[in-house]
Every structure is written in C-alpha cells, then in structure tokens.
Amino acid sequence: MSGDLHELTAAAQLDALRVGDVSSRELTEHYLDRIDRLDGALGAFATVTPQLALAEAARADRRIAQGEWSPLLGLPLGIKDLYQTAGVRTTFGCAALAGFTPTADAWTAGLLRRAGAVLIGKTNTAEFGATCYTDNLVTGRPTVTPYDLTRYASGSSGGAAAAVAAGLLPLAHAGDGAGSTRTPAATCHLVGVKPSRGLVSSLSNTTIEGPIARTVEDAALLMDVMAQPAPGDLDDWRPDGSFLDAIRKPSKPFRIAMWTETGLDGAEPHPEAIHAVERTATLARELGHEVREVKIPAGYDDPVRLALRTLFAASVNAVVSSLVPPDRLLPYTRWLHAEGEALSGRDLFAAQGVLARYASAFLEALDQFDVALTPVTSGPPVPSGHFQVDGVAAIADRMLAWSAYTPWANLTGQPAVALPSHVDVEGLPCGVQIVGRRRGDGVLLALAAQFEHAGLWPDVHPPCWNQ
C-alpha cells in the first residue's frame, strides 16, 4: 500500500497493519515526511523523534511478522508535552525546561506505549497548560489551526489538534482541565473526548486525559487503551465493556437539554455557534431524540469567576514553584504564579466551596435529562494574539468569554465530547459539545457515533491536507 496513507483513519491503518497491507515503517516515514514539510507553519510539535520512531516502527513490524498483536501496535502517535515520556524530553510548554528528559513515562503515556504505539513526538502545549491558546517559547511561534494559519488552534492541547487535522498524526493524546481537549478539537474540525472523572488517571480531579481524533471510532479505540486507571487512584472506575463495542450499539432515544447562553454578562455567542447547536438539535429530533431548550443552569457571577481564577492560580503556583524561577516564565504564567503566592488556605477553601455549589447547580438542573447540548466555544477560532490585547491581567476574562461552555463539565466530572458541526463561509470550523451522565461515557460516545453516521459534519480537510 502506498500513496496518501494519512487519508486512512487510525482504525483503518491498524487493520492494514494487521493484515500486512502496510508496514509500521511506511506509516511512520509518511508522517515524519509530512511533519518535516508542513509543521513549520503550524507549530504542532514541540519535539519530533525520528530515530526513536523508526526504531519503534521496526520493532512493531517484527512483532507483527511473528504473529503478535496489541491494540495500537505499529500506529504512529503523539503525546501531549505536559506528560512525561521516558527518554524523550518533556518541556511542559516552558522553555526553561527545554533540556528536561524524564526517566519514566507518566501513567497514561506508558499505557499507550505498552499498547504498541510508535512515538512520533511530543505535541505542543501551553506553558504548564495554563491557557486556552498554545503559544510558548519552546517553539517560538503560536500553534495555529490548519484551516487558517493566522488563528489559534486553541489550547492547551493545540498541538495535538493541529497535528491530527493537518494529517501529521492519525490521532493524538490530549488532556483537558477546563476544555483543553474540546476547544482545540473544535478549532480543527475534530472529535475531542473528556472522559468521566476516574476513568483515566489524571493530574487532578478536574484534569483528565483523552483522545483527539478524526472519527468517533478512532477516539473510542484510543479510549479503550487509556481507560485503565492507575492502582490507588481514588476515583478509579472501569467501564463494563469496550468503547469500540459501545459505539456499535444502537443509541436509545435521549432527553437532551440545549442552551447557547455563555453564562457570562456581555459575552454573546457568535451566530455560527448558535447555528451549530440548532442544526445538531434538528438532527437529534430527526433521529428520535427529545430536545428541549433550557436556561443555562448557572452563570459566571463574580464569586464563580474569582473562584476559577483562584483554582488556576493555586494549581500553577503549586506546580511551578519547585521547577522554574518565576522570571523564566511567560508573562501570564508568571502573573498566575504571583496570584497563587498571595493566596491563603482560606482563599482556596472558599473557592472550592463556590465551585462545588456551581457544579451542583448543573447536576441538579440536568438530572431529568440524559445529555446536554451546547456550543464548544462562543465563536470560531480567534486570531493569534486575541487573548493578550488588553494586557496580562485581562487574559483570564478574555479566555473565559471564548471558552465559557466547557469548564463546568470538568467540575462536575461528567463525560463530554466535542464534535464538528460545520465549516463557515470563511472556511473556519465550528463545533458542538455533548455532555452525558457521570460514568456514561460509552452511551455518550454511541450518541456521538450516531450523529456522525447521520452526517452531522462534512468530511472536509484544511488546505494542507493534499500537500
């Protein structure tokens, strides 16, 4: 098999590997060539590992020839640069850590590698995952959506989304603390999954790893590998069966709540964001689901906004303090670090209480529904520099105005999936978010697959796809 191998889905590539129609080396060389030619304009990778990748591909080909098989054997993959990889540098998006090479894999990275994935490299991320855009001094340029090279691919998993959308990877590992898998997926016309709390071992009770992929099937096959929590994980739970099996089961009729309000005074959704939800609701009704428009269960009043800022500042401060001198951080990360330094234990405790009440409002209001349907972002991908135009202290509010729909699902622990909807007249992707009941990940992915098979989104690609 030769030609445009990136046209194949990840599932199709695995099938081709299994029957010998393509070798892991062929796939790996194909993606390395595309990265070499195209990534200079995208900023999708912080680190590329050609020698390691080719060695791992050769090992995978030998194992396949011997009749061995594992879920990702021979499939090229990128791992987000917030997560440690043994023998491969991990910068956390921070130039001060450009020389750091871990000796052990993070838990989920280890699962993926032991499943046979070929590590092509580390996908670019925001510095310590602190922003919903990806722009750091490791690469020295912003990560942009391949649909418009002047616009952010969001963040903090911007590199993962840009790479998959441009055909530099078949699928990618990502992580989501307030939307960091879902908003990049939306800017790049992709599927992005934030699992239920405890399904994948995570850095905190709001941040969790998941896949970014072109299809629901590809996302499900990566979920099957990632959904093996580490021993001792306090929120550990395991699904009843395979996610690949779950998406092949007929989706029952659901009660779906929908809204397009941002919950933030003065932040109105773009007409394209509203259109994305309305066309998805129309399709859902045609498929036999009940869809009811409701008011957003809770808004971003001043206490909630302050609590969110407190949570992020405390998290960044806790991580950064032992790793990097503040003067070597980017301005916004440095500002968050300083905010965190000024917090007291009482401040953090009060913020946790506010956010617990905020999350509870969503759980209570949605108890009578199976799924919530919203935009992923308040509008299409934004131009590079959009969040910084009013100075460092205004970045948090500008980010929230654009990504207001995603943080609540992290706080409630519910599964959430970003799906493509359409591409607007300017060629920019627009997406929708579906959120299910806690630990209902398989059911939610089955609904996502039903929407996909019913034609919710067109099979389109960015200009670089055929290069």
Image (tube, grey):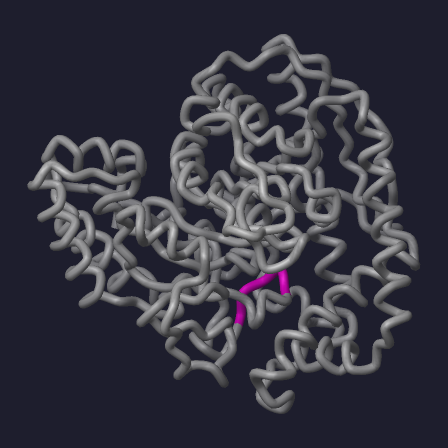
Give the residue furthest to the front: 232
Vertical relation: 266 (above or below) 243: below
Does residue 45 appear to the left or right of 300 in the view shown?
left
Does residue 321 appear to the left or right of 90 in the view shown?
right
- Residue drawn at (11%, 36%) of the image: 67
- Residue drawn at (36%, 48%) of the image: 463
In depth, the one of 89 and 261 nearer the eye is 89
Does residue 117 appear to the left or right of 386 in the view shown?
left
Estimate the x, y position of residue 55 in percent, counting from the top left: 15, 61
Quarter occupied by residue 325: bottom right
In depth, the one of 422 and 227 nearer the eye is 227
In reply to whether residue 456 is colored magenta, the answer given is no
Estimate the x, y position of residue 363 in percent, counting from the top left: 81, 34
In reply to whether residue 133 is colored magenta, the answer given is yes
Vertical relation: 201 (above or below) 310: above
- Residue drawn at (58%, 51%) of the image: 233
In depth, the one of 426 and 195 nearer the eye is 195
Q: Can residue 215 be seen in this view?
A: yes
Estimate the x, y position of residue 426 in percent, counting from the top left: 53, 44
Vertical relation: 297 (above or below) 50: above
Quadrant, the N terminus = top left
Estimate the x, y position of residue 286 in percent, counting from the top left: 61, 10
- Residue drawn at (12%, 54%) of the image: 58
Q: Main secondary structure of the magenta part?
A: loop
Q: How many labels does the image show?
A: 0
Vertical relation: 122 (above or below) 300: below
Q: Can residue 42 be seen in this view?
A: no
The stretch in magenta equals 131-135
